[in-house]
Image (cartoon, grey):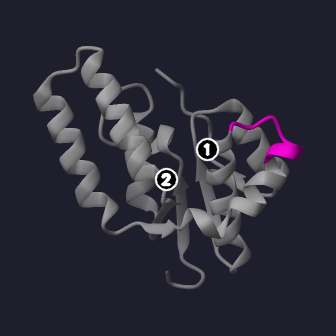
């Protein structure tokens, strides 16, 4: 990661919108185009796989799921990934301070880890509680994108 580069941190709820057309897709794709670096937690690949499996069970076409999976895999190779074990302690502190689910706390701790190493972070997610916690923790939170 280049020091001083514009880093876009995407949690899973935001990143999924880049590959599954829904409300917020255009915004996420525009943010990704504008960013120098894309970043997320190492848990994101598992969460994307889970979300795509859920969408498949809910009736999404095999072609749509395959296209989304291929798009994610191609993009994921270039992401700066924060390893989960690096941020678990901070995530535990964050759940004590904010009303966050555990995986959301890992995403927030991951973004804060990147920021603490001198990078400017733009944080994108679709969760009101996570957005609020990110603001309190000093991250620049992009305008909220709606959950479908």
Indicate left or right for 55 with 101 as reference: left
Q: Nearer the viewer, residue 126 or 101?
A: 101
What x and y, as percent, mark residue 121? 63, 64
Of all residues, the one furthest to the right in this rendering is: 97
Is any part of residue 34 visible from this angle? yes
Of all residues, the one furthest to the top in this rendering is: 59
- Above-or-below relation of 107 to 77: above
Image point (70%, 40%), residue name: 131
Answer whether residue 145 is magenta in the image.
no
C-alpha span from label 1 to label 2: 8 Å
Indicate left or right for 66 with 83 as reference: left
Q: Residues within 10 Å of mark 1 (few under 14, many from 20)?
A: some
Answer whether residue 100 is magenta in the image.
yes
What x and y, as percent, mark residue 4? 60, 81
Indicate left or right for 29 with 62 as reference: right
- Mark number for residue 103? 1
Residue 119, quarter of picture: bottom right
Q: Residues within 10 Å of mark 2 (few under 14, many from 20)?
A: some
* Element at label 1: helix
* Element at label 2: loop
Tally of marks: 2
Start and end of the magenta stretch? Answer: 95-101
- Above-or-below relation of 39 to 55: below
- Mark number for residue 43? 2
Image point (23%, 44%), residue name: 69
Disc with the residue nearer the chain's start (1 vs 2): 2
Image point (38%, 42%), residue name: 48
Q: Nearer the viewer, residue 129 or 51?
A: 51
CB contact under 8 Å: marks 1 and 2: yes
- Above-or-below relation of 28 to 23: below
What x and y, as percent, mark residue 43? 49, 53
């Amino acid at each position: 990661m280049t020091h001083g580069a514009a880093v876009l941190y995407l949690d899973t709820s935001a990143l999924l919108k880049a590959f599954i057309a829904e409300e917020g897709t255009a915004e996420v794709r525009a943010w990704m185009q504008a960013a120098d670096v894309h970043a997320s937690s190492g848990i994101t690949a598992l969460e994307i796989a889970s979300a795509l499996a859920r969408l498949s069970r809910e009736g999404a076409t095999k072609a749509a799921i395959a296209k989304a999976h291929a798009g994610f895999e191609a993009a994921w190779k270039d992401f700066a990934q924060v390893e989960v074990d690096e941020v678990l302690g901070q995530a535990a502190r964050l759940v004590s301070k904010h009303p966050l689910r555990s995986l959301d706390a890992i995403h927030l701790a991951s973004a804060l880890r990147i920021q603490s190493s001198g990078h400017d972070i733009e944080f994108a997610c679709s969760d009101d509680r996570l957005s609020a916690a990110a603001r309190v923790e000093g991250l620049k939170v992009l305008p909220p994108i709606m959950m479908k």
